[in-house]
Structures are given as C-alpha cells and as structure tokens.
Amino acid sequence: MKNLLLISFKFPPYSDVGAYRWTKFVKYLSQKYIVHVITVRWKNQFDQPWHNDIDNENIKIHRIKSNYFHNFKYKKFSDDFSGRFLSKIRNQILKIVNFFYFIDEAQDWGKILMPYCLKLLKKENIEVIIATGGPYMVNYWAGILKRKLPDIKLIQDFRDEWNEFRYFPFKWQKNLSLKFEEFALNNCNALVTISKGLAEILSDKIKNKKIKVEVIHNGFDEESIDEITRDKGKIKRDFSFIYAGSLSNNRDKPMISFLDVVNDNIGKLQEIKIKLFLSLNDSKCIRAGYKRLIEDGHIIINDFISQDRLFNEIYNSFTALHFMPETQKFIISIKIFEYAMLKRPILSLNFGGDTEQLINSKKLGYSVIYKDNYQGIKNCIFKIFKLWERNPYYETESEKDIKDFSYKKLSEKYIELIEKL
C-alpha cells in the first residue's frame, strides 16, 4: 500500500467539528492507503464515538509539539460559578496570546512541523500530502514544503474562507495574512473546497492555472446514522426545534432573529420547545435575552453531548435548526446532511448562497433569509407548526437524494484526485 500524509492541526482527541471531516476521510482512505497524520498533542477533554474511526493499523498518528496553548484555548469549563470565572480568566489570557498569534494558532508551528515532515517524507517514501485548515497557517507551511520538495504532490483542503471576513487590528497584519494565503493557494497541485461558492472565492486568488480546483463536499457517515434510524418505526414528536453547535462567526445573529420571532408570538406557540446544546460562552446571550422563554420551559439549554446521543435527540425532535450567517453563505455545513439522513426537516436561517441552493434543490426543508426578514421567519415557523399539527409523525424522504454525500463515496472522489496527481 502507498503512503499518504495528512497534516491537520485539529484531529482526535480534539472533539469539535473541526476534526470531524478529516477523521471520516482518513477512516475510508485507510482502506487503500497507509495514512500518516501529523497533528498536535491534544488532551482528551470530550469523548466522541467517531474518535474510534482512527483505530486502524493503516492510520499512523504523529503527535508533535505546538508553541501555542491549544489545549488551554479549547478547554471546556463547567457552567457553575467557578467554571464561568475560569472562562473569563482564560479569555483575558488569550487576548494577550493572540496579540502575537494574530493570524492563527498554527502561525509558528512550522518551526516544529517542517523538520518532522522532511524526515517522515524521506523515511516513509511519501509522495502525496494533504493539508487541511483551519488553522490555515497549516496550509502555508504545507506550501513551504512544496517549495522545498517540488516533486511532492500537495492538495490544499479548505473548509472555510481564510481572510474574507476576518478582522485585524492593523492593516499590515491583514496584508501579511493575505500574502500567506496567496502563497498557500499557489504552491500546490490541487485545491479542494467544500462548496462551489468557496471554490470561486479561492480560485480568484490562484495565478498558477495548472492547479486543479475540485469541490468535495462535507457529508455524513452512513454507518453512524444507520444505528439511530435502523428498524425504527415512525414516532410521534412534540413541536420541538433543536440546535447543537457553536454560535461563533456571527451565527448568533440568525439565532437571535429566530428567537425574537418566537418570543413575540409565544402566545400562539405555547407547544414550542427549543432544545439548545451550546458552550458556556454561547449560552450567555440566550440566558440574558430570553429569560421568560427559559423560565416557561420553551427554551432548554444543555451542555454538549456525544454525537450518538445528539443524533438520538435530533431524531426525536420535529425540526432541526440551522444557522448560516452572511460571512459563510458559501459554506455547506455537515449538519445539513446529518439532519437529512435523520429524516428531519430543516429550518435554515441563512444569507442565501450554497446552503439555500442545496436545501431547495434537494427539498430538505425550509430556507429563509434572516436579515431584515421578520415576517418571512414568522411565516415559516407557523408553516412548520401547521405541518406538526397535521402530522406529528412527519418524516422527510430526502435522505434518498443525498446518498452521494456519504463520506464513503466522497472518499472515492478524493482517491480519484490523488490517483490523477
């Protein structure tokens, strides 16, 4: 079997979504290749069932040091007084640290990463590298490797934009980040993105026309979801909405647009339950702004739970909430595919773009522009309410339309690209 190298700063036991895409790809790519993964030394703070996907003799994990305080940054504190206090202290310390790491946490990882990569490439006779961000300085350091070893085939994998909506205190910082991005995009053999919109944004920065640009979407793992839905008959659900994940990157804006409509119309929506699985920091604005809805049991705020438990919660809820802000209108998130496979209609508050196109074309639920669209959001909530009243057993059939987005099939596309290179 040929050797393949993945460079991914975020990888299990890192537990948030940033590690999920490539954990799944490595799971399936390891059926054809010996996959070496270089990552940093993460502490196991939250077990996820998908961490087991990398327990495979064809997956070789290389955990190396980082000068950044990555475990400290992503540590999950409790929701009690001491946890909230420690979270505040952590945020103040990170403000100081991030003054120096103004691009991202992989900014000086190259000092450790580069020598390790050069030795590993030679020792294992590796010819193909895949680098994935964020943090996106990983892609910059991979570009440096490509410059040093031009015969190596490098694929740069982008899940998000790098600089379009990022704020920097000083113009020179922004210019430096843009310079690094342009270098990464122009020093590779192929660029992979998760959507057509993101591919268009990044392609405009590529001057080397020999570089292949491919769209390989996010997706779902059929094996994980089968365990939830297999052999289950239709169930009667209450009028519930569910959201789990981060409210960072302006996702709080569509969330607040949704909750404002619910708050104003709660007299006609007495049956509504909104189940939120949020981090301590993300839950603050909800607790402060919607005390009445929380006290009356319409909003239930929970800590994060493991993926298998969350899938059960989604499956037992009537509607799955999805928030995609203006800054990410060209992103199609993993959640959409998982919701569809769990047969739940989606209410997506977004800014149009790739997300809206997918939801409408595959009939996955409801897509609503959230900005300055109070009436549109209200109409949609009441449309879902009427649907629930008519049929609390309702399930979508859209899982049939997105079979091609399984990670097993998406991995086949990656293998095709690797073989072409």
Image (cartoon, grey):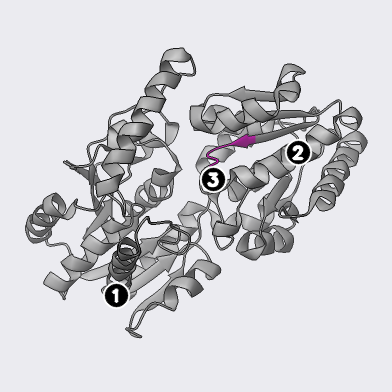
Q: Which residues are magenta?
A: 243-247
Q: Which residue is mark 3?
A: 222
Q: Which residue is mark 2?
A: 260
Determine the secondary structure under disc 2.
Answer: helix
Tell me the chief SS of the magenta region: loop
Looking at the rendered image, the disc whose residue lies closer to the viewer, 1 or 2, is 2
Determine the secondary structure under disc 1.
Answer: loop
Residue 189 marker: 1
Give whichever of 194, 350 is nearer the camera.
350
Q: CA distance from mark 1 to mark 2?
A: 47 Å
Mark 1 or mark 2, earlier in chain: 1
What residue lies at 74% left-to-right and 49% top-to-bottom? 397
Mark 2 or mark 3, earlier in chain: 3
Estimate how packed mark 1 is, as few (under 14), some (14 to 19) or many (20 or more) residues with alpha carbons within 10 Å. many
Q: Horizontal placement of 124 versus 336: left or right?
A: left
Above or below 315: residue 58: below
Task: Tell me if residue 105 can be seen.
Answer: no
Task: Tell me if residue 205 can be seen.
Answer: yes
Residue 242, how many percent across, how many down? 67, 34
Above or below 101: residue 244: above
Residue 119, how many percent across, how many down? 7, 56
Q: Horizontal placement of 354 versus 260: left or right?
A: left
Residue 317 marker: none
Q: CA distance from mark 1 to mark 3?
A: 30 Å
Residue 301, how many percent across, how many down? 62, 24
Looking at the rendered image, the disc whose residue lies closer to the viewer, 1 or 3, is 1
Mark 1 or mark 3, earlier in chain: 1
Determine the secondary structure under disc 3.
Answer: helix
Amino acid type at circle 3 is Glu
Q: Is residue 277 magenta?
A: no
